[in-house]
Amino acid sequence: MNAGMEHAKFKREARRHQTGYREQKINVLYNKYLTWLTDDDAMNGKNFYCGFEIFENVKNRYKIKFEKPLRRDIINKCSDMLRSEHIPFNLFIPFKTDFTFCRQVFNEILGNIESIDTIEIEYAPPHKELYLDDRTSFDTCIEYTHSDHSKGIIGIEVKYTEKTYNLTNPKEAREIDDKNSKYHEVTGKSNLYKSAEYIERLKKDEFRQIWRNHLLAESILLVNDNYQHAHSLIFYPKDNEHFTNVGKEYVEMLADNKDRKFGLVTYENFIEICRKYCPNDAFKNWIDYLQDRYIITY
């Protein structure tokens, strides 16, 4: 079975899994699609874990007020069970209540973390013109103190059923090809890649979003002297083999010793690490939720 057919099978199974979760665990009706919650259920936080004030963080982030009409894009972010927009809240907000637990988990992934300082969802640095001068953001940004006592950031991209990133923004399309753009400037200054010739490959649909998110992390290092370390991670389910395959190809383009700046983390591995360091029953219930909610059973 080719990669396209494998991914189509994975999406079908993910759709079946999320539909079953809605029917059996959340016990609510659907909207236009089987994996879309109704507007009312979405605005009541049914797409989010019920503990750790996760939905309170969602409302604060999107400035949700229970007034109508609500913006359609905000409703979609809160209602679509099959896409990844809601997932960073469910994966990372609980860590805001226990930075020690968070440190233990991310030390398994990266190492050399002395403490976790901040966790922000959908983070883009202010004054975008200093960085990539576009709308690139991290699904989650974690600021930490390194074991050498300097500061570092972890920029996380979270995926579920998504695959390639299609280029639809005309400004972005122009700047991707403009050798004087921030993309090219940061690529050159960061020395991330074995060869400058790789940029033509990085511009392609399979790699563009990985490249941009990694460049955002590197641009923060270049601009802000407060940080001495930056990492770009992709979280995704292991059955979404697109990111396993593309991620390995991306690592092959990185210069020697730059692979520590980039990482692939499957949901399965993340959940296993969380179980290893789980501090109490409240977190165990959350981990069980992640397992039931996002790990597809065939």
Image (tube, rainbow, N blue to C red):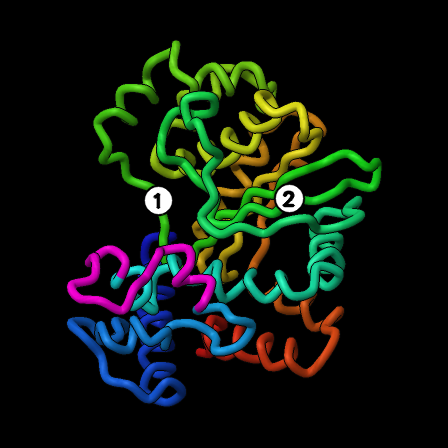
The C terminus, quarter of image = bottom left
| Residue 10 on image: x %, y % | 38, 65
Q: Is residue 39 above or below residue 226?
A: below
Nearer to us in this view, 246 or 208: 208
* Residue 272 placement: quadrant: bottom right
| Residue at x-position 44% and y-position 16% | 184
**Given the image, on which type of amino acid does mark 2 rest?**
Glu
Labels 2, 1: front one: 2
Does the rendering let one see residue 1? no
| Residue 81 on image: x %, y % | 34, 69
Q: Is residue 63 magenta?
A: yes
Instruction: Name the element at disc 2.
Output: strand
Q: From the viewer's perspective, is 10 left or right of 237?
A: left
Q: Is residue 270 above or below residue 126?
A: below
Instruction: Name the element at disc 1.
Output: loop
Q: Is residue 73 above or below residue 178?
A: below
Q: From the viewer's perspective, is 34 left or right of 53?
A: left
What segment is highlighted magenta in the picture?
56-74
Identify the disc placed on residue 188.
none
